Image: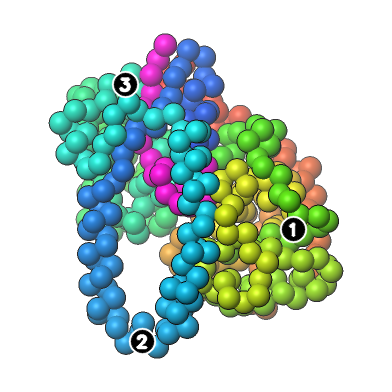
C-alpha cells in the first residue's frame, strides 16, 4: 500500500477550502493500492503573524474604519450569525477528514519530526498564491531528501511573478517530480520557474462527480424553488441584482451569511449551514448567485443554474478575479458572468456541452493524478 501525504489549507471555516481538501483526500485514496491522508498542519505561526499584521494594518487605516461604521457595527452585532456554521464545520473536520496521526502547529514541528510517506503532495486551493504569502512548508520543505514531491492543482492567484517571487518558485520547485496548476494563467507563470511541463488540471472538487457529492450532501428543509446566495465580497450591485431576480422569478432568495452586507437586512439567512448543507443547498437550488470560485464550480458539477459576479472591481486582472473568469471560459459559460450593466433575466443552462467538456477535463486530470502518485 502506497501512502500519500497531502498538505493544503483544510481546517478553515470556508466551504471551498474544506471541500477541496476532502475531495483530494478522497480522490487519492480511491486509486488502487493507495492511501491518502491530510497532513494535520495548523499554520499557527502565520495565524499569529497575520493577526499582528492585521492589527497594525487597522491602526494605519484608522480613518477608513472610522468611516466604515456600518460595516464594523454589523460584524460586531451579528457575530453570532456569522460564526454559527463553525460547529458543523468542526464536525465535518472530525468525521470526514483522514489526517496524520500527529498534529503539527508550526513548520519547525514538521522539520523536527516529518511524517513518512511514499509520496508528498501539495494540494489545491491558493496554496501557492503570492497574494496570501509564499510558505516553504507548502513547497514540502520538510520532506526527506530525494522524496517524491508533487503538486495537484495549486492556485497562484496571479498571472505573473515579480523577480523575488520568481526566485522563490525557481528554488522550491526544483525538487518537484511533477507540477500542475488550477488555472491556465498560473500554469504559464509557473512554467517560467520550472523546467518540466506544468499542465492545468481541475480543482479537486471536480474530480468527484455529482453522485459522489450527493452521498454526503444534506437536503435543505426548504419547500419549493429558491435562489441560493453565496456572496463573499462586499459589492452592492450584485445584491441588488439578486433582489430584482427574486421578484422576476417569483422565487425567494436564501443567503449563506458570509459578508456583513447580508446580515441585518431582513434576508432569509442560513447561518448554521456546514459543508454538507452547503452541497445540498447548491444541488437543490433553482438558481445560485455567487461571487465564489467554488460556489460556481459546485453549481457546474450539480448542473444547477447559476450566475457569477466578480468580487473585486477592475475586471479579470484584479486580485483573484482571473480564476473565476478562467473556469467559466473553460466550460463555455462566460455568459453566466454578470456585470453592473447586465439585464435582470433568468435563462436555463444547457448542460450537455458543459458536461462533455467536464468529462474530458476530468479524465485528463485523473490521468495526471495517477502519474503524479505513480500508479
Front residue of 254/128: it is 254
| Dot 1 or dot 3, earlier in sequence | 3
Q: Position of residue 26 (x, y in %)?
A: 52, 29
CA separation in Å, label 3 and label 2: 51 Å
Residue where numbered disc 1 is placed: 287
Q: Residues within 10 Å of mark 3 (few under 14, many from 20)?
A: some
Q: Quadrant of the N terminus?
A: top left
Q: Position of residue 211 (x, y in %)?
A: 70, 33
Measured along the vertical axis of the image, is residue 208 above or below residue 119? Answer: below
Residue where numbered disc 2 is placed: 66
Front residue of 225/86: it is 86
Q: Residue at x 68, y 55 (%)?
A: 333
Q: Residue at x 43, y 24 (%)?
A: 36
CA separation in Å, label 1 and label 3: 43 Å
- Residue 10 in magenta stretch: yes
Magenta residue span: 1-20
Secondary structure of the residue carrying tag 1 is strand
Q: Residues within 10 Å of mark 1 (few under 14, many from 20)?
A: many
Secondary structure of the residue carrying tag 2 is helix
Measured along the vertical axis of the image, is residue 75 above or below residue 304? Answer: below
Instruction: Single out the mark in the foreground, 3 or 2.
Output: 2
Residue where numbered disc 3 is placed: 117
Front residue of 223/315: it is 223
Q: Are marks 2 and 1 in contact (CB under 8 Å)?
A: no
Q: Position of residue 232 (x, y in %)?
A: 53, 64
Residue 5 visible in the snapshot: yes
Q: Residues within 10 Å of mark 2 (few under 14, many from 20)?
A: few
Q: Position of residue 103 (x, y in %)?
A: 29, 34
Amino acid at each position: 500500500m502506497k501512502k500519500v501525504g497531502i498538505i493544503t489549507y483544510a481546517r478553515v471555516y470556508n466551504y471551498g477550502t474544506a471541500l477541496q481538501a476532502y475531495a483530494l483526500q478522497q480522490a487519492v485514496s480511491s486509486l488502487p493500492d493507495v492511501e491518502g491522508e491530510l497532513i494535520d498542519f495548523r499554520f499557527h505561526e502565520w495565524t499569529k503573524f497575520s493577526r499582528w499584521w492585521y492589527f497594525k494594518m487597522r491602526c494605519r487605516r484608522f480613518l477608513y474604519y472610522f468611516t466604515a461604521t456600518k460595516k464594523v457595527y454589523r460584524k460586531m452585532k451579528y457575530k453570532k450569525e456569522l460564526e454559527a456554521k463553525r460547529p458543523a464545520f468542526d464536525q465535518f473536520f472530525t468525521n470526514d477528514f483522514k489526517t496524520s496521526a500527529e498534529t503539527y502547529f508550526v513548520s519547525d514541528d514538521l522539520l523536527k519530526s516529518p511524517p513518512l510517506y511514499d509520496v508528498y503532495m501539495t494540494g489545491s486551493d491558493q496554496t501557492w498564491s503570492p497574494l496570501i504569502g509564499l510558505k516553504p512548508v507548502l513547497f514540502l520543505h520538510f520532506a526527506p531528501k530525494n522524496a517524491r514531491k508533487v503538486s495537484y492543482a495549486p492556485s497562484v492567484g496571479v498571472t505573473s511573478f515579480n523577480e523575488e517571487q520568481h526566485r522563490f518558485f525557481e528554488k522550491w520547485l526544483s525538487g518537484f517530480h511533477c507540477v500542475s496548476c488550477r488555472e491556465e494563467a498560473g500554469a504559464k507563470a509557473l512554467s517560467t520557474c520550472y523546467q518540466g511541463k506544468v499542465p492545468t488540471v481541475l480543482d479537486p472538487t471536480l474530480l468527484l462527480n455529482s453522485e459522489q457529492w450527493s452521498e454526503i450532501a444534506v437536503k435543505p428543509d426548504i419547500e419549493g424553488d429558491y435562489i441560493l446566495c453565496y456572496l463573499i465580497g462586499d459589492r452592492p450591485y450584485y445584491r441588488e441584482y439578486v433582489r430584482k431576480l427574486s421578484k422576476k422569478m417569483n422565487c425567494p432568495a436564501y443567503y449563506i451569511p458570509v459578508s456583513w452586507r447580508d446580515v441585518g437586512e431582513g434576508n432569509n439567512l442560513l447561518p448554521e449551514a456546514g459543508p454538507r448543507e452547503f452541497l445540498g443547498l447548491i444541488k437543490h437550488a433553482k438558481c445560485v448567485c455567487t461571487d465564489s470560485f467554488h460556489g460556481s464550480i459546485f453549481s457546474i458539477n450539480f448542473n444547477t443554474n447559476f450566475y457569477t459576479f466578480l468580487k473585486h472591481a477592475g475586471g479579470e486582472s484584479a486580485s483573484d478575479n482571473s480564476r473565476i473568469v478562467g473556469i467559466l471560459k473553460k466550460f463555455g459559460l462566460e455568459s453566466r458572468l454578470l456585470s453592473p450593466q447586465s439585464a435582470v433575466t433568468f435563462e436555463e443552462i444547457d448542460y450537455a456541452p458543459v458536461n462533455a467538456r467536464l468529462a474530458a477535463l476530468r479524465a485528463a486530470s485523473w490521468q495526471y493524478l495517477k502519474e503524479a502518485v505513480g500508479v
